[in-house]
Amino acid sequence: MNHRQLDSYLREINETEAKQLESKKNINDIPSAPPQREENLPFRMPDSPFFTNGPIHIRKHNRFAPMPLHYHNFIELNYIYSGSCRQWINGQEVVLREGQVCLLDSEVVHSIEAMGDNDILINIIMKKNTFTSSFLSRFGSRGIVSDFLANAITENTNHNRYIVFESEGHGELQWFMRSLMCEAFGSRAYAEEMIYNYIMLVFTELMRVYAVRTNNESQHGAAKADLIQVLDYIEQNFRDCTLTQLSKAFSFNANYLGNMLKKRTGKTFIELVKTQRLIHAAGLLANTDKPIEDIAQAVGYSSLGFFYRIFAEQYGMTPMVYRNGQRQGDPRSDG
């Protein structure tokens, strides 16, 4: 399947869409999914129907009828191939435009309003452990922006976040997504291997999307910012950043900004600063011979004892054990 054939395939009205077009009601075409509820309560989507052929499943969202409130234990990446899509995510209205991407963590309650003939939404769903080792090894230690993305595919206690990528102007991402779908909806050999590699390229390009956007908006002095811009500011100013300073930089009330960070990341402002400081400290421990006391000072801690304590809480070992483990090729060495 090539890109032209893909377009024809996606625009064709399938059997379920034909029924929905006639009835204007959602038709359940997912095996073993629970029956639709009359009351306005979310239902849990099962995992089993989607992962019979591997840990990644790609499907076209059925148009012409609303998808009711639901949640699930897997990660979902929504891509708007054509038109637009109006969703409700954690009670907030989110409108996605052609070429944009929305990444949903597990347990996020969301619904999708009825989509028209030109509105084509692609659902890419992934088991939470799909990228645990390969994804984290590439992105997990580069800063809290990448840390936020990496958390979406790891086990933690607060799986209820989502992130929107305004990626419509990024041609490389569009090409990767189309090629990914050609593999998913075609019948070529080694499709599963190609899908996995395209997914990694998609995530890599999404990192670029925010890097470019943040740089452009900072150059124009934008007063308002989304979550990733705020996290990027913390990442760049972690040594001496305060909540008051951060709120002034983005023209937000400090209490509002602090509550927003907690709600959207599961971490307080202090915890986010600590995360970035320790990420930077870990890099210095692994890649330099600086004394540990100097590293503590460099990342913003005047008390060496306090630095030792919070580093051990984060990494499960002392800074010295961590450094020795990195030198020996085993970052989890306990000495």
Image (spheres, rainbow, N blue to C red):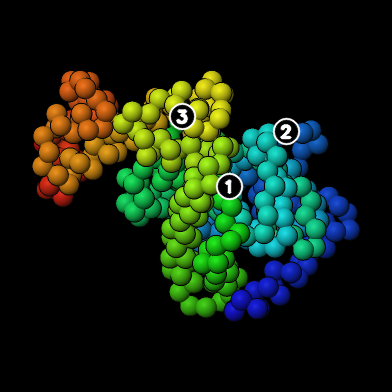
Q: Quadrant of residue 14?
A: bottom right
Across and down, in percent, residue 121 comes to: 67, 58
| Res 203 seen here | no
Residue, disc 1:
164
Label 3 – label 1 distance at C-alpha: 22 Å
Residue under the point 75% across and 70% down = 12
- Cα separation between marks 2 and 3: 38 Å
| Residue shown at 23% from the left, 39% from the top | 282
| Kind of residue at badge 1 | Val
Q: Are marks 1 and 2 in contact (CB under 8 Å)?
A: no
Position above or below: 283 against 251: below
Task: Give the side of residue 140 with respect to residue 281, left or right.
Answer: right
Residue 153 locus on image (x, y percent): 45, 46
**Left or right of 49 on screen, residue 82:** right
Looking at the image, residue 113 lies above or below residue 1: above
Residue ID for mark 3? 246
Which disc number belongs to residue 41?
2
